Amino acid sequence: MNWSQVINPFNNITLSAFVAVIPILFIFWALIIKRMRGSKASLIATGIALFIAIIIYGMPVKLALLSAVNGALYGLFPICWIVITALFLFNITVESGQFEIIKHFMASVTSDRRLQALLIAFSFGAFLEGTAGFGAPVAITAAMLVGLGFDPLYAAGICLIANTAPVAFGSIGIPITVASQVSSIPEMAISQMVGRTLPILSVMLPFYLVVLMCGLKKTKEVLPAILVSGISFAVIQWACSNFLGPSLPDILAGIGSIISLIAFLKFWKPKNIWRFPNEVSTSITGKKKYSTGQIIRAWSPFILLTIMIVAWGLQPVKEVLNSFGQIEFKFWGIHNVILSADGKLISHVFKFNYLSAAGTAILISAIIAIPLIGLNFSDGVKIFMLTLKQLKFPVITVTSVLGFAYLVNDSGIILTLAAVLANTGSLFPFFAPVLGWLGVFITGSDTSSNALFSKLQAVTATSIGVDPVVTVAANVSGGVIGKMISPPSIAVAAAAGNLVGKESELFRFTLKHSFIMLIFICFIVLLQAYLFSWMVPGYHLLTAEISYINYDLSLGSRYLLVLAIILIIFMITIKLIKNRVNKKPVRKAQYD
């Protein structure tokens, strides 16, 4: 027996919206006012959402519970799987002592905290977002900054804020691909529209980050480096999104920004080296020298990560891996049972792609790296178990928030709020990014937000005479701003920065900046809708028929063979370097 979603349970959209927003307002209250632990706040919010879904929206108890369980399962895999493996890779680097060499390398490039934040949080984080996505960029970059000596709260907060502009093109462009499938607008057109919005933010973001760290006066001291970092990233992001499509902007822009800034720092240095006030003096100086081989060996886990993630992102490789390592099943009791507002059955299919998941690529990278950086596999097992212990509360937070997200989606609660925004008439383009922001805040994923709202964005824009690509792209662009305050992202950043239990502080740190950037994007979209129509690309809507590409599995197999050869050559190279190293780095690690 089917159950139909309810959007306006009180037959009064204002009253219905007031009730629908209660669990969301609770999250804000719990984290900002009550300063509640993230895991506790998310569990209570899920309980409130269950009550509203069952009592107010009339959702059957069984469906409500199954919806929450389905979301929690998605939170465990692939999201928590990525975060666990990413922090595991970082932890083995620390435990082996190789991160001490990375510290010295970063100090040799620049010991200025402002520039280190640009290189790692902004540029390297963007690269990781383009390859792995989900929680990996924040998990790895926040942990790296803390390892370099950054204040944990600032490290986590800066990485969350930096991980905005890249999110739209994250995980090989999947968010835009999903928006295209749902809205019937070609993904190239959406990519071009987003690529004419976010580069504006990308130019400003490095400046914003540094001002946040040290104030305007100290920011002026490194303005040339900020311009190099931001402009190089924005230009490459714009060019790739407009001429190559949504798959490569983050990867190429991240690499280009890193190379540009490092090259620039060879010829220019700030007059004053800035560190955090009252920062404890570290032993990192320019006196201790490491060979190029030692530096390559220290970075080897992250080089392996890059190679593996890029290979895992290739569709032919995914096809081969899924043919051997994927379990797909229809979620019992809820699949094709709920009727959406437009009368379509909502599918609930869980794909356990344990081989092609990005988390598996990260784990393989870590396993290969273990002997290369001077550890044995028994050490690796111990570090993995310590990593699981380190992440026990963030895992609870992520799974409960995803259960909450699935529940508000399936019950129609989130559609009530969307209906209110859709009724704003000619002002809808201004509020279109808010819808994407809200979707990412709840789900933690720009992809999920686009799947949820892209059709509504397109239909509403058409009804008021605005080109639908403007509002669909606004959903994508607005969504990236919601990432920094999304409870799953907060949980990941807190875990990486040793701030478990202090999620409320991190939420308070990022909230204001999320609102500032959101309003900025809202005004840009409003101008694009009515004044800057020349920015809107030309396109034709996709036909209703969807063509599926049948990939040749032999092509994926050849790619994997090439990958294996590259990995073997790399391992031999690192082994040769290791044999030349006379002194082993001192092991040092700390887990909470």
Image (cartoon, helix red, strand yellow):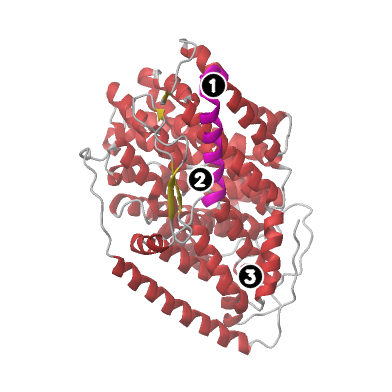
Instruction: Return the residue nearer the eye: 191 or 544.
Output: 544
Crowd class of label 1 (few under 14; some 14 to 19; many from 20; radius 10 Å): many
For the point 67% across and 27% down, the residue is 29
The amino acid marked with disc number 1 is Ala
Q: Quadrant of residue 345?
A: top left
Quarter-wise, where is residue 402 in the image? top right
Residue at the (73%, 42%) spot, across then down: 502
**Marker disc for residue 164:** 2
Q: Secondary structure at mark 2?
A: loop
In the rendering, at what x and y percent does residue 188 appear?
Answer: 28, 47
Image: 319 above or below 524: below
What numbered label is drawn on residue 102? 3
Q: Which mark is residue 20?
A: 1
Task: Tell me the quadrant of the picture where the N terminus can be found.
Answer: top left
Magenta residues span: 53-78
Whichever of callouts 1 and 3 sits on the residue coming sooner in the sequence is 1
How many C-alpha atoms fall within 10 Å of the one at disc 2: few (<14), some, or many (≥20)?
many
Left or right: 288 in relation to 337: right
- Give whichever of 535, 389 is nearer the camera: 389
Where does the image place residue 134, in percent across and percent down from the top left? 51, 50
Category of crowding for the residue at label 3, using alpha-carbon neighbours closer than 10 angstroms: few (below 14), some (14–19), many (at least 20): many
